[in-house]
Amino acid sequence: MLHARKRGAIIIAPDYPLGPEGNYADICDSIRDFLRWYKEDGYFKDEKDDSESNSWQERIIKKINKKDITIDKDRVFVEGESAGGHAAVMALWINAANDGPKLSVKSCLLRYPMLVHYARDFPPENENNGMVIYMGEKFTQTDVTQRAKDIVAAINELEKWGLVPTRSKGYAPQNMSATLLLSITKLWQSVFQRKHGEKIGGPVDPTNPDYMDCLERVDRCVDTVDHDYLPPIAMYHGSKDPNCPIKYTEEFQQILLNKYPVYRRQGALSLREVSYLNWKYSFMKVGEGSSKKRELAWQPMDEVGHAFDYDLDTDREEFLKATYEDIDKVWLSKD
């Protein structure tokens, strides 16, 4: 966000349906609607009388209260973090589809993206006695499994009556309990690939890309997208990421290099593995003996996991500086 502001960019962060209420197709439909809304100069509802107002560009110019400015609508930069990385990749391929809106996306940044059906494992027995820890509480594997089954049963029952609500906002970690439960019990894929009104775990159309994860989509949709509308992609990923392992981002990179000639061009694709941070504001132990306590302080880190790039100083972290230099070369280029 800070980098975008320094470059005079306007940030548009569209909401989309979250799971487990929503499925993959819901997310793709929302992304598709947003891309078309953007291209067609969609409007906002007027806050006072709920009537149509000006186009989104005119509304933004009015909101920021500045005269004599223009919005370069065709200089689009797409960014996604973690699960947002999944949405970002879907947006790129939906946009570049043969029947897609084909916006002029200049560049994309993926920050430790979730590119596969999310799955994690129960801890081993020798780690907290096999207990699952969430928000400081411990849960047995039996309890976690039952709670996940309860989610599935509730969705099946509600969808039978057409009553499943739509949720577009949820903040970590408080609203991530379903993520933990469905991923660790390996129910994530079934829940997100389901068709509304059909029992979870039922058949899925194997030819519909809107039900695929990112790796499957980019691997199978090579011939159904216009490669000229796929932008350069910059990525960085923590080497010890337990939530979204870097191996899947490396696999994503290889698929692009092997099947998409556009990504073999110089500067079109980069992945930086981050294994060390020079300056991170985080907890550290201070003092000795019984007086030892945890305090927040700036310190280096050599265990780089998930969501590690908050509160970093671009000038202190070479990977950040190099990544944004790569982005700016294409995003801000006059070509």
Image (cartoon, rainbow, N blue to C red):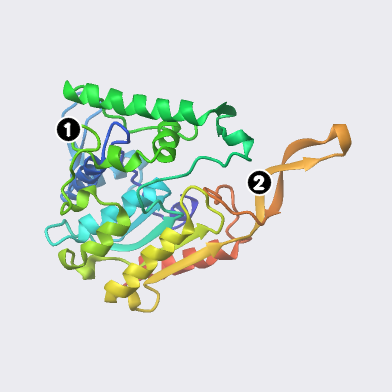
Residue nearest the viewer, comparing 130 with 52: 130
Instruction: Tell me the SS state at disc 2.
Output: strand
Chain-order first, disc 2 or disc 1? 1
In the rendered view, tell whether residue 27 sits above or below residue 177.
Answer: below
Q: Amino acid at mark 2?
A: Tyr
Task: Please provide percent x and percent y for residue 293.
Answer: 78, 35
Q: What is the quadrant of residue 317 in the picture?
A: bottom right
Residue nearest the viewer, comparing 219 with 64: 219
* 248 displayed left or right of 140: left
In the rendered view, tell whether residue 121 sits above or below residue 133.
Answer: below
Q: Quadrant of the C terminus?
A: bottom left
Q: Residue at x 13, y 62 (%)?
A: 98
Q: Amino acid at mark 1?
A: Glu
The residue that disc 1 covers is: 198
Answer yes or no: is residue 295 visible: yes
Instruction: Tell me the SS state at disc 1.
Output: loop
Task: Please provide percent x and percent y for residue 320.
Answer: 54, 61
CA neighbours of label 2 inside 10 A, class few (<14), some (14 to 19), many (20+): some
* 74 displayed left or right of 322: left
In the rendered view, tell whether residue 287 sits above or below residue 217.
Answer: above
Q: What is the quadrant of residue 166 in the picture?
A: top left
Circle number at residue 281 = 2
Task: Please provide percent x and percent y for residue 193.
Answer: 25, 42
* Discs 2, 1 touching: Cβ within 8 Å: no
Residue nearest the viewer, comparing 68 with 193: 193
- Tell me the mark number nearer the camera, choosing from 2 and 1: 1
Q: Check the image and name the residue furthest to the left.
A: 99
